[in-house]
Image (tube, rainbow, N blue to C red):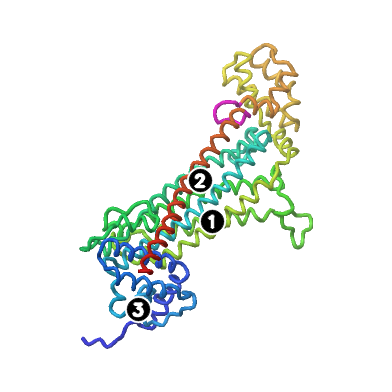
Amino acid sequence: MTDTSVFPDPTYVDTVLEPLFEGVKSHFAGYMEAIDRAHLVMLHETGILGDDHCAQLARAAQSAHDIDAQSLGYTGEYEDYFFYIEAELRHALGDLGGALHTARSRNDIDHTVFRMGLRERGDALLGQVLVLTDALISKAEAEKDTLIVAYTHGQPAQPSTFGHYLSAMIEVLLRDAQRLSDALDQVNYCPMGAAAITTSGFPIDRVRMADLLGFSAPVRNSYGCIASVDYITALYSAIKLTFLHLGRCIQDLAFWSSFEVGQLYVPNALVQVSSIMPQKRNPVPIEHMRHLASVTVGHCDSMMMAMHNTPFTDMNDSEGEVQQAGYAAFKSGDRVLRLLTAFLPACAINPDKVQRNGDAACVTITELADTLVRDEARTFRQAHEIAAQTARACIAQGSSLSEGFAPFAQAFEQATSRAPALSQEAFQITVSMCAFVARRDRFGGPAPKALTAALTSYRDCSAALGSVRDARLTRQSQAKSQLDTAFTQLMDR
């Protein structure tokens, strides 16, 4: 068979090569420049290339990368951005221009570029998670005595405080932040030196390459440098969980701010008005946060599925176009985090609605049962039945539990054949929401002492995660300075 076709096919250009070229210009060009500079410094330091050749290559590489990448259009003359840069070097230096590619491959370059892009975006996202965490801690501290009705199965359950609810949210967010930080630690290993998949016959220094690019160390196994995608799947899994969990709390905000519940007041600055119904206050930002959180989860799922059932080798399924698509998760996720950071601290609890809902549902009834066990020597099951009869009577009469001493006394006497020792005044204190919360002073409970201790631990945890993140960023900043110095010295030779 005679094949007279010439690469690239025009349709392949339109559907693959040009979009990839445009993506590299927008997302990866700066990382490729850093890799070229670091690789050249390493080639010089190991003696793989001599002084004069390295100096010429350094100056030509600087010139090639100084071109405004965004001004370039894809012509099909070169397969991709990498070959465009190499062509510029060869145009300037002749055959010497190809020497920069000694002991490396597009394979190890690609995965190093992808890791550099992910660690930058990942640490930025983690920073915003920690900003939200600290804002929630401050809000929880301010609201640690603010009563709310806690709901289970969509029904009023027990009293708690807004600070206690936010603390539960904070704990999950801190665990998500830890997962994200751990995933970023795994991203921060360098594939350079793996070359195509088996390293090189040249005496390369993989540790030096990792140091110059701000990585913590090289990925050890060279096959895994190219074939493993767990740095992608682990990171997007951590991002997915963060927004899946936040979405559940955001849904609570919608429920709490509904007209029927009304215990969360959303300020006017975060409320939209109906175009036709002037009485309506629509807390629309909640809906935007909810759908953006779901969209972020969807972007992460797309990345996971792109890796599903792929071969354990070099493949485009984990490379340029897929990597670019994944960046959408960082964009939508950042929008959720910034909006929630502004939204929740601005909201307030409506105490009248809390009291109304609490009274209507007899939410303190569990404490009455507990008190009968402690003070009246009843078994919990008998106490539970007496409390249940009391609650049913109050709900049937449309009265609050604090007004229910008479039905309580009647139920108690029916069950025990004696009058309760609990006085009416003591009964009213027992079934108050403040007393209910104050009693719950065990580890993790809503009472002030327990909650204050929890909030202190959250601040410590957030600060520790911030320190780990700062260490990664400091390493990268110092590496950039070190690389700039070494590369400048090469150019000046």
Secondary structure beneath label 1: helix
Residue carrying label 2: 466
Give the percent coordinates (x, y) of residue 148: 67, 37
Mark 2 or 1: the one toward you: 2
The type of residue carrying mark 2 is: Gly
Residue under the image location 40 percent in, 66 percent down: 488
The type of residue carrying mark 1 is: Gly
Question: In which quarter of the view is residue 323 placed?
Answer: bottom left
Q: Are marks 3 and 1 in contact (CB under 8 Å)?
A: no
State the CA–CA distance, disc 2 to disc 3: 43 Å
State the CA–CA distance, disc 3 to disc 1: 39 Å
Q: Are marks 2 and 1 in contact (CB under 8 Å)?
A: no
Give 59 or 95, whichever is nearer the viewer: 59
Residue carrying label 1: 333
Give the percent coordinates (x, y) of residue 210: 35, 56
Counting residues from the start of the chain, the first of labels 3 and 1 encountered is 3
Give the extent of the magenta segment: 440-448
Vertical arrangement, residue 295 with respect to residue 86, above or below: above
The type of residue carrying mark 3 is: Ala
Question: In which quadrant will I find the C terminus?
Answer: bottom left
Give the percent coordinates (x, y) of residue 37: 37, 66
